[in-house]
Image (tube, helix red, strand yellow):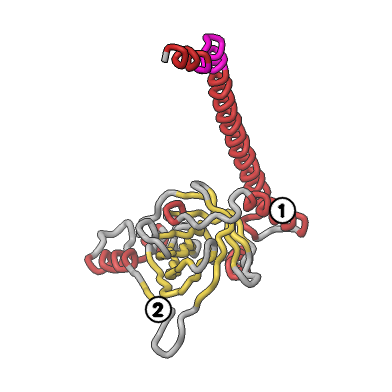
Amino acid sequence: LPAAFSSAQCVRPIVSFSNTIRGVHNHGRVACLATSMSSTSMTMARDTENELESRKYELLNIVQDTQRGLVTTADQRSAIEEAMVVVEGFDAGKEIDLSKLDGTWRLQYTSAPDVVVLFESAARLPFFQVGQIFQKFECQNESRGGLVRNVIKWSVPRLLEENEGATLIVSARFSCISARNIYLKFEEISLQNINISDELQTVIAPAVLPRSFLSLQILQFIRTLKAQVPVTSPERRSVGGLYYLSYLDKNMLLGRAVGGGGVFVFTRAQALIF
């Protein structure tokens, strides 16, 4: 038994102090490597974010002189398309985040013919003005769709307040049919928020005379007038359209109307209240 015990002692693994130190050093190297990799990842992410912001700024800078798409040359349109593709590449393949989409977006540029024609009309006709154009998405608590309102501020000089005289709203329901495509089903067109000019108010109720009950009623009626026209009816199908959201983050939205309907560049705006 003592001999066996002695033999067992001879084959017993020996844990030396040097092995312990070596293990500590190895662990330290692994920890340092992990820290280095984490730092490198953070640096790369920061560089990517900075590059993205730079590309977004370039896109907005290119569209700045186009009057939202009214005045463009072939070279400008080509540069805008290239800049959009670059920005879209940072967000490719990701599914629509409805929590980011929710809110109000201001139009900065479009090549959509049905919008550009408004700018062309305002440029030709002295009695028609087009102000700001917005898209307002309401989908915060939704999972596969929501409501979108296309909001156009417009005016008739001398009759309505400049650029903010009235508001035209085209409302539509939308549903997500793929990771990036939404289908719009238009429901209603409405006219509201009519703000008449000081000149027209003076005609209705002259400033030099006491305002009568009737004149005050007319002014109040105009201010609160809200005309609504449904797009759908039992006799016809609702007008719809396919819209591809090609890029989306907290302050920029890029879209493409499927079927050659034009491109859109939006930036985040303050909330609109109707």
Residue 162 vs residue 120: left or right?
Answer: left
Q: Residue at x 59, y 25 (%)?
A: 33
- The amino acid on which the numbered mark 1 sits, given as a three-letter code, is Glu
Q: In the rendered view, would you say 1 is above or below 262?
A: above
Percent x, y of residue 79: 73, 53
Residue 213 vs residue 9: left or right?
Answer: left
Q: Which SS does the magenta portion mostly show? A: helix
Viewport quadrant of the N terminus: top left
- For label 1, the crowd category at 10 Å Cα-Cα, with few meaning under 14, some 14 to 19 and many 20 or more, is few
- The amino acid on which the numbered mark 2 sits, given as a three-letter code, is Pro
Identify the residue position indicated by label 1 in the image.
82
Query: Which numbered disc covers residue 230?
Result: 2
Q: Would you say residue 15 sits in the magenta stretch?
A: yes
Q: Pointers 2 and 1 in contact (CB under 8 A)?
A: no
Percent x, y of residue 206: 33, 61
Q: Name the residue at the bottom extreme.
A: 235
- Label 1: which secondary element: helix
Q: Residue at x 53, y 52 (%)?
A: 248
